[in-house]
Image: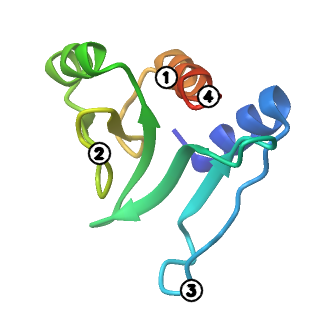
Amino acid sequence: MKREEIFKYIKEKYNANPEYLWDDTPDAAIFRHQKNKKWFALIMIVNSEEYINVKTEPVYSDLLRNQYDYIIPAYHMNKEHWNSIIISKNVDKELVYELIDQSYELTKK
C-alpha cells in the first residue's frame, strides 16, 4: 500500500491534509481533527518500512496484533491504545481504512 492512497482516503473522507512537523523526519506526516487538533494518524518511515499509527481500543489492539503480522504495538506512542500498521507490507487495504476510521472516531472528543 502506498502513502498516497492513504493521503487521498483521508483527504476525501475527513478533509484533512498531512502536516509535517519535524525537520529531522521530513517524511513523517500527521493527520489531525480540524476542531480539537488531536492526531488520528501518523505516517512515517522506520528502518526502511513505512508505517501508519492509528488508535484502537486496547482489547481490539491485542486481537489485531495476534491476527496480522503487519500490525504491531505503536512505534513511539502509547502501545496500549495505538498500533503501527506496516503499510509497506502486503496489507488488507480495507482493514487499513477501517482502522483509520476507528482512530478518527476514538480521537474525536
Say which quarter of the image contains residue 57: top left
Choose mark 3 or mark 4, whichever is in front: 4
Q: Is residue 101 left or right of residue 67?
A: right
**Mark 2: secondary structure:** loop
**Mark 4: secondary structure:** helix
**Mark 1: secondary structure:** helix
Can you identify the residue that label 1 sits on?
99
Choose mark 3 or mark 2, whichever is in front: 2
Q: Answer with mark 1 or mark 2, whichever residue precedes in sequence.
A: 2
> Which three-letter amino acid code belongs to the residue tagged 3?
Asp
Q: Which mark is residue 40?
A: none
Can you identify the residue that label 3 sits on?
23
> Which three-letter amino acid code belongs to the residue tagged 4?
Tyr
What is the quadrant of the C terminus in the image? top right
Q: Answer with mark 3 or mark 2, whichever residue precedes in sequence.
A: 3
**Mark 3: secondary structure:** loop
